[in-house]
Image (cartoon, helix red, strand yellow):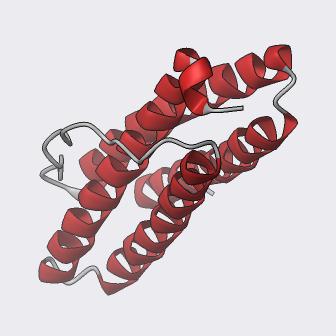
Amino acid sequence: MSIYADPRLSGYLSRALSHELAAVQQYLMQAKLTGLWGLSEMSARLREDVNEELVHAGRLMERMLVLGVPSNATQLPPARTGRSAAEMLQIDRVLEIEAIRLYEEAAQYCARMRDTETQALFAGILQDELGHLAELDRMLMDLAGVT
């Protein structure tokens, strides 16, 4: 089935790709900034996030190609860095919550359409994003001194 037969699915894939590329841009900018601040552990963690988001983008592009649509990410929003480590993590938390909502909705749509392969892709990335959110929450608690 060509993706063009289902514009809603094409829209989910394009939105997801745009989100992943925006996350790459944001996390890379933040990794550089935290490195300049001397927060080497946080900078390394953000670079790991960059790599994971790139993997997500690649998986989405591959699925788009299989379905017969070229990747078509929209213009990326400006990267948001924050003025402190805590503010940066809060900004990233919002980004991850947006991703979770997108992937939940997209996976549910694919389930209704019985597109099990794309549903599995969205569900897998959703699990990764839930893990990112949990990690951000842990990092925020660590910064606040909560154990």
Q: Who is closer to the viewer here, 88 or 73?
A: 73
Q: Is residue 34 above or below residue 135?
A: below
Residue 56 left/right relative to 50: right
Residue that appears at 32% across and 42% down: 73
The answer to whether 75 appears left or right of 130 in the picture is left
Which residue: 27% across, 51% down? Answer: 88
Which of the 4 image quadrants contains residue 47?
Answer: bottom left
The quarter of the image holding the N terminus is top right
Residue depicted at 39% across the width and 70% down the height: 46
Which of 113 and 17 lies nearest the eye of the viewer?
A: 113
Q: Position of residue 36 (x, y in %)?
A: 12, 80
Q: Position of residue 35 (x, y in %)?
A: 21, 81
| Frontmost residue, 106 versus 143 | 106
Location of residue 78 in the rendering, given as x and y in whole percent from the top left corner = 13, 43
Residue 105 in picture, x, y percent from top left: 65, 19
Give the position of the C terminus as an image quadrant: bottom right
Relative to 104, say whether 49 is above or below: below
